[in-house]
Amino acid sequence: MKLFFTLLVVGLSTFSYAQQTFNITWMMGITLEQASVTINTGDMIVWTLGDGAPHTVQSEDPDAPGTFGSGPMQGSGQTYQFTFNDVAVIDYHCGVHGSMQGVITVVEALSVEEKFAANLKYYPTITSSKLTITSLLPVERYEIYDAQVRKVAEGVFTNVNYSILDVSALSTGVYFVTVVSKDELKTAFKIVKE
């Protein structure tokens, strides 16, 4: 019975913290926020070149694994991938274009839901017209609720990792935006419409 319980706990923890792959479109103009990710040990990041310019993925950070680094890449669509197995906070950059920078935070155990919330970015939080949402995990749809928790808008993402929502038709006030991933994970945040 003790062996069964141990196997059950190990199996459930493996299910809750299964390896995930995070995708970063690596190109000129990427912001530090867009290139930064929080992952579990054992997760993989795939950098995909989004423009035709030459790029590298590299780090001189002492916490970076010794084998981390892409070497020169060129051509839209080319990829570099790496699986992170140790807890660390790693600064990285493109060796060709120094303005392309990011931070990889590797932690021991976040749930899938926590990873989704940690890797969803949105700005500005106070807006009169546009709301930008980016996610390193694929997103499917959004819902916007007013302060009385009435749904006032909803829609689908045409790009699974990036969208700009037009909120200009909303009245002035506080709203809650719920974002739903392709795996039905949900997270919510607050914005103010001016």
Image: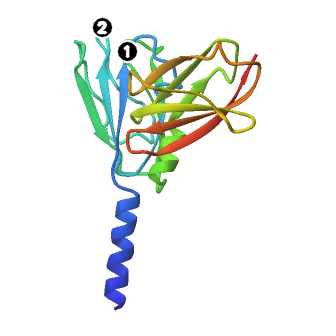
Q: What element carries label 2?
A: loop
Front one among 127 and 173: 173
- The vertical placement of 5 against 99, above or below, is below
Q: Tag on residue 101? A: none
Residue 62 % position (x, y): 45, 39
Which quadrant holds residue 74? top left
Q: Which residue is drawn at 45% across and 22% down?
A: 162
Q: Residue at x 28, y 11 (%)?
A: 54
The colouring scheme, among rainbow, by chain, secondary structure or one colour, is rainbow
Residue type marked 2: Ala
The C terminus - image quarter = top right
Q: Which residue lies furthest to the bottom in this view?
A: 1
- The vertical placement of 76 against 138, above or below, is above
Q: Which residue is drawn at 48% across and 38% down?
A: 180
Residue 24 % position (x, y): 37, 27
Which residue, given by chain and number where applicable, does mark 1 sit on?
A: 27
Front one among 155 and 81: 155
Q: Neighbour class for label 2 at 10 Å: few (<14), some, many (≥20)?
A: some
- The vertical placement of 36 against 72, above or below, is below
Q: Which residue lies furthest to the top in this view?
A: 52
Callout 2 touching callout 1 (CB < 8 Å):
yes
Q: Is mark 1 on a helix, strand or loop?
A: loop
Q: Is residue 47 left or right of residue 136?
A: left
Q: In this view, does 182 lie to the left or right of 178?
A: left
Which residue, given by chain and number where applicable, does mark 2 sit on?
A: 53
Q: How far apart are marks 2 and 1 (CA)?
A: 8 Å
Q: Residue at x 45, y 17 (%)?
A: 100
Residue type marked 1: Met
